[in-house]
Image (tube, rainbow, N blue to C red):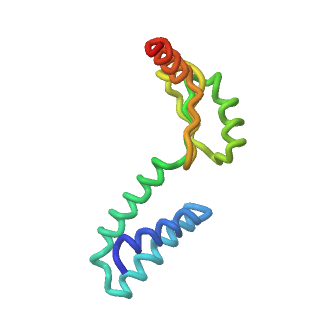
Amino acid sequence: MKSKEYAKALYELLTSAKSQAEQEKILEDFKEFLNKKSKKKMISKIFGELLRIYEKEEKRAPKIIVASEDFKEKSQELAKTYGVENPQTKINPNIVGGFIIKGRNFILDNSYKHHLLELYKKIVNS
């Protein structure tokens, strides 16, 4: 097995764990497994791959970006109707107003900035 495959398997196990204690047990068992298989040298490569997987998944994780606290509740309710579960919510005043919902397979941009830019493009191109 290659380090990438071990990292994917370990990622699946760690994300399915229900507690930090369970994750720690999985890591201990994994290290023990590698020692028994004489693959101790692969640990650094495996954890490097694991870190890349976590970073990639973090980028794909559902997010809500709101202009202010005023839009937070409405955007979270709307996100649920689109099937977005447990999104991270960030405040970004640069979007002027409204919100942006980023799911795994879509982006719903209901920000004032987006609407103002669209209006500007229509006026300029008329």
Q: x and y percent of residue 35 in the render? A: 36, 83
Residue 59 horizontal side relative to residue 45, left or right = right
Tell how many labels: 0
Residue 67 horizontal side relative to residue 49, left or right = right
Q: Residue at x 57, y 68 (%)?
A: 22
Quarter of image, res 87: top right
Q: Residue at x 69, y 36 (%)?
A: 78
Q: Is residue 101 above or below residue 47?
A: above
Q: Is residue 53 above or below residue 111?
A: below
Q: x and y percent of residue 113 in the render? A: 51, 20
Nearer the observer, 55 or 106: 106
Q: Residue furthest front?
A: 126
Q: Is residue 25 above or below residue 35?
A: above
Q: x and y percent of residue 43 in the render? A: 33, 72
Residue 109 horizontal side relative to residue 126, left or right = right
Q: x and y percent of residue 73 in the render? A: 69, 30
Q: Residue at x 68, y 47 (%)?
A: 83
Quarter of the image for the N terminus: give it: bottom left
Q: Residue furthest left?
A: 41
Q: Is residue 107 above or below residue 15?
A: above
